Image: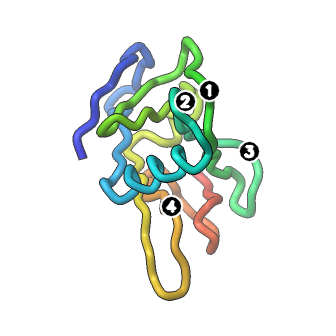
């Protein structure tokens, strides 16, 4: 799970590493979703929004291009962008993709989440 940070200008809180990780399975599924949606030059935007059952919810969407203040990560050719405010909640995050007989989907393993809801898309920090 090597990362290459393209835009390292976002400042980390003292003692914090502003990195995220993405598993090979998640990269494969993101790449497949890009192909299905016809996304060629875009990025996957990860973010945090107010709301959801636990107070904050994950944002997960395609974006045509990054903003000047975004932190840009490249994982095996897949571009992921995170805005500076969201990165404060997402540093240390591992994005994975899990499959089981009951369900399959992206999983956010966030060390900053103090509590999360049963659906896994909402948390509190």
Q: Is mark 4 in CB contact (under 8 Å) with mark 2? A: no
Name the residue located 58 percent from the left edge and 66 percent from the top edge.
120
Name the residue located 39 percent from the left edge and 17 percent from the top edge.
7
> In terms of secondary structure, where does tag 4 sit?
strand
> In terms of secondary structure, where does tag 3 sit?
strand
- For marks 3 and 4, give the CA distance: 20 Å
Q: Could you say which disc has been placed on residue 42 in the image?
A: 2
Label 3 or label 4, whichever lies nearer to me, is 4
Name the residue located 71 percent from the left edge and 54 percent from the top edge.
55
> Badge 4 is on which residue?
106
Q: Could you say which disc has been placed on residue 64 in the image?
A: 1
For label 3, the crowd category at 10 Å Cα-Cα, with few meaning under 14, some 14 to 19 and many 20 or more, is: few
> Badge 3 is on which residue?
50
- For marks 1 and 2, give the CA distance: 4 Å
For label 2, the crowd category at 10 Å Cα-Cα, with few meaning under 14, some 14 to 19 and many 20 or more, is: some
Label 2 or label 3, whichever lies nearer to me, is 2
- Determine which quarter of the picture holds residue 3: top left
- For marks 1 and 3, give the CA distance: 23 Å
* Precedes in sequence: disc 4 or disc 2: 2
- For marks 2 and 3, give the CA distance: 25 Å
Q: Is mark 2 in CB contact (under 8 Å) with mark 3? A: no
* Precedes in sequence: disc 1 or disc 4: 1
Q: Is mark 1 in CB contact (under 8 Å) with mark 2? A: yes
The x, y position of residue 81, in whole percent, is: 50, 30
Above or below, 64 relative to 49: above
């Amino acid at each position: 799970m090597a990362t290459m940070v393209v835009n390292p200008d976002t400042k980390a809180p003292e003692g914090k590493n502003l990195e995220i990780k993405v598993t090979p399975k998640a990269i494969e599924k993101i790449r497949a979703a890009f192909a299905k949606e016809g996304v060629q030059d875009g990025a996957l935007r990860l973010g945090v929004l107010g709301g959801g059952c636990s107070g904050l919810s994950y944002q997960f969407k395609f974006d045509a291009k990054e903003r000047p203040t975004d932190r840009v990560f490249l994982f095996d050719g897949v571009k992921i962008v995170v805005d500076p405010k969201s990165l404060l909640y997402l540093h240390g995050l591992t994005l994975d993709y899990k499959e089981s007989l009951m369900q399959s989907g992206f999983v956010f393993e966030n060390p900053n989440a103090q509590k999360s809801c049963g659906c896994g898309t909402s948390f509190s920090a």
